[in-house]
Amino acid sequence: MSADAIVEVAGVGKTYEGRVQALADVSLGFPSGKLSTLLGPSGCGKTTLLKIIGGLIPATTGEVWVKRRKVEGPGPERAFVFQDFALLPWATVLRNVAFGLELRGVPTAEREEIARQQIVEVGLAGFESTYPHQLSGGMRQRVGLARALAVDADIILMDEPFSSVDEQTRRKFQEELLDLLRRKQKTVIFVTHSIEEAAYLSDRIVLLSPRPGTVSKIIQPNIARGQRSPDEIRRDKNYLDAVDEIWQILRRYVA
Amino acid sequence: MPRTHRPENPRVLWHLASFALVFGCWEIAGRWPISVAFPPFSQTVLALLRMLADGSLPKAYVSTLQPLVIGVILCGIAGIGFGIGMGLSRAVEWFTLPVFIILQAAPMAAIIPLITYIYGIGLTAKVLAVVFLAAPVVVMNSYKGIRNTNPSLIQMCRAFLGTRSQEVVKIILPHAGALIFAGLRLGLAMGFIGVVIAELLITPTGIGDLITYHSSVADYPEMFAAVASIILIASLTIHGLERLERRLFPPELRGSS
């Protein structure tokens, strides 16, 4: 396991209700400051693995170490972005973004100040006092992302954050996400079932096999991003190779 | 330039028209006459005014509303408490849920003699009749409101380091608020039924007494006026609570995000 792994997963297995085995003996490390994707066919346990890393569900076997400390539950160094956004329907955008800080007992003025900054960062300036039901799916997920950024965790865990967002919005969102996360030097663990999304976003792609999920292969696309436009990246040879390589593996798993 | 006056809300006109239609039919049916025991609308209104003027109706309501208000307040405190307790704790649920399921299914009229046997014919018995009818719906609504909390929101709260008490105060209770309030409103509706049944079956007092008495001496307009007045008061109260509920818990702010 690499020395700079901020998250280490050691022999993690998960069996639900004594019958369904979702994960079997997963061991891998997630490098600090990189965006890693968990990719696999549906039901391979990728969301389960993410929630175990997040401390939201316990592993049946094995351990997770974050910053060399064993995970016993959620922690301040990890923030979660949910597939279904998980916003409070009765709270404004501002309160939703500040909610993580509210739970930590940060005084109102201070947490709203931080929340306002994050709302600007995710491109929702002007929507502070609107309610989730007035926002589109893409905008709701920006609120979810801003909430995760507001608690200033080093590690951001994202569970299929764009699966409820339409395609056009998703591309724009992906580009902005890349930009934002690189500027902030966050470590991101990202669950997706989209090959293109994984290849486009990731420094490292962890391919999981079908249930019970195990690490099938780790691919590092090595796409030179630099100052290149998203369209240039999507025409990059390494990007296209990565998409092809992933598909060659995944196609065996699709019945 | 003077503008022709248009009603702000044409629905109000329709409402008035439907009242006029119903009361008109009642008047015609009463004058037909369908039965000597069925007075026309106009006579019923006159009887109502008479009973208001001689103070018998206000006096009846003072004694009817007493057990109703006490019973509904008891349900509001203890019922919501039990419902929330059952929603939050499996132990309380195991212990209490069967009681309320049985209460919900039990035919009230069959229980009332039992209440009278134990508690006599005073205020206590009437309050109990209200509580027995109102409590199940108050408790069950609170319980379901708590249990139906979006699990994703609870997980979110935990992921952002919320404690169990923060989870209850900031997620579960606001989420259940609308259902709890609706339970209270339905409980009040059941309470009206309970108090009238109690006054008809336990001791003739209040509005139940007015109905029984006037029917026994064949003052049918007075009897109908008493019946109509309790229906009117019950439906206006319930309707008012429903409006309050919509204002306090707008539907668009309730659903899962």
Image: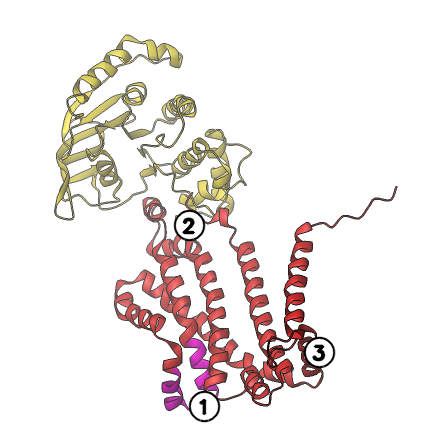
Q: CA distance from mark 1 to mark 2?
A: 54 Å
Q: Residue at x 42, y 50 (%)?
A: A105
Q: Residue at x 32, y 64 (%)?
A: B86
| Side of A213 where B93 appears, left or right | right
* Residue type pointed to by label 3: Leu
User: Which numbered mark, 3 or 2, is in the foreground of this view?
Assistant: 3
B197, B79: nearer the viewer: B197
Chain on which label 1 sits: B
Q: Residue B210: x, y in percent?
A: 58, 85
Majority secondary structure in the magenta region:
helix
Q: Residue at x 12, y 45 (%)?
A: A19
Q: Looking at the image, is A136 positioned above or below residue A225?
A: below
A135, A237: nearer the viewer: A135
Which residue does the numbered mark 3 point to in the structure image?
Answer: B46
Which chain is painted in yellow? A
Q: Residues within 10 Å of mark 1 (few under 14, many from 20)?
A: some
Which residue does the numbered mark 1 point to in the structure image?
Answer: B121
Which chain is painted in red? B
**In the drawing, what numbered circle is on residue A105?**
2
Q: Secondary structure at mark 1?
A: loop
Chain on which label 3 sits: B
* Residue type pointed to by label 1: Ile
Q: Which residues are magenta?
A: B112-131
Residue A228 seen in the current view: no
